[in-house]
Amino acid sequence: MPTQRVPARIEPAPALRSLIGKISRRLRPTQAGAGLTPTQLSVLATVVRRGPIRPALVSQLEGVNPTMLSRITAKLSHDGLVARRVYPLDRRAVLLVATARGRRLQRRILAERNDALGQRFQALPALQRQRLVDALPALDALADSLLDQAH
């Protein structure tokens, strides 16, 4: 008689982190964002969402060093997606702002990702879809607590 394997106890934090990363990586590629690296796309999203914004804050939020951020913003600026503006309270400082083209691109990227996720979500069995919907408030609270921890 074969022995039955007992599944190892699942550790929720590593499993959740791994799944979130896997979903994020699989949603990352888009036709609209082709030609930009994941880090460039993330910086663009931050500037669209939080701009006008000081480069130092973008560097902190994105976890990239200032030299790397300078290269990224130079590429985004060259592509017409981000512009540098003089900070009105300190004319020596700079703010990053998304251009209209950058905001349009970000909207297209999000639409592609939402469509891809929505199609796969609808393909799940009804019970799995409902479980995911039921988990949304807890996931939102977890995300908020992680933001609170970072500050």
Image: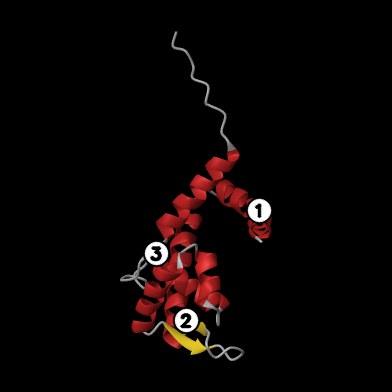
**Left or right position of 66 against 147:** left
Q: Amino acid at mark 3?
A: Pro
Disc with the residue nearer the chain's start (1 vs 2): 2
How many residues crowd around disc 2 within 10 Å: few (fewer than 14), some, or many (20 or more)? some
Which label lies toward us, 3 or 2?
A: 3
Helix, strand or loop status at disc 3: helix
Residue 142's mark? 1
Residue 85's mark? none
How many residues crowd around disc 1 within 10 Å: few (fewer than 14), some, or many (20 or more)? few
Separation (CA) of disc 3 from disc 1: 24 Å
Q: Amino acid at mark 2?
A: Arg
Separation (CA) of disc 3 from disc 2: 17 Å
Report the front residue among 114 and 69. Answer: 69
On screen, 78 above or below 17? below
Write down the residue under mark 2.
Answer: 103
Write down the residue under mark 3.
Answer: 38
Quadrant of res 83 = bottom left
Report the front residue among 112 and 78. Answer: 78
For the N terminus, the image quarter is top left
